[in-house]
Amino acid sequence: MTTSRLPADIIEQFSALLGSLARMVASGSKLSETELKVLLMGSDLEAEDPTVLGELERWGKILIAFKEHPSAEIRHASVEALKQRGLKEAPVLYAVDLVAKSTPTGKLKVRPDDLNFELPAGGG
């Protein structure tokens, strides 16, 4: 994976892929190289360009890190990391929100396991 940032005009050109990437992460994808290349085929950018592929992979890793460690702190760090990559705030917030909504927040547990509700006679 390459670590160089893409020029702003190229980031702008394929920033629309961030939402697609977030939906893939939200559905449980680990974002294989083949998945990323197929996603890039929908843009006007070259799927075989290692710089472009590397940037998309980096975005995916940020979103996956948040999905695997859903906390307010990691959410904030994910937003900041994506913005540092040159992405605008609105699509970043949308993408992180998509991933957040896919993360289970825990199950409601009730003790005792059985609850019986009884209405008083004639109060129905």
Image (cartoon, rainbow, N blue to C red):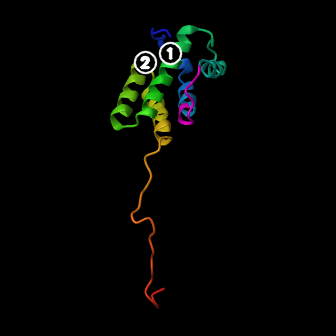
> Residue drawn 47% across and 14% down?
8
The amino acid sitting under disc 2 is Arg
Q: Which residues are magenta?
A: 25-32
In front of the other: 59 or 121: 121
In front of the other: 11 or 107: 107
**Quadrant in the picture for residue 48:** top right
Are circles 2 and 1 on residues that touch, CB within 8 Å? yes
Image location of residue 38, percent across then percent down:
66, 21
> Residue drawn 40% across and 34% down?
69
Q: Could you tell me which secondary element the residue under label 1 belongs to?
A: helix
The residue that label 1 is drawn on is 55
Q: Residue furthest bottom?
A: 122
In front of the other: 55 or 11: 55
The residue that label 2 is drawn on is 85
Magenta span includes 27:
yes
> Does residue 25 sit above or below 57 in this rendering?
below
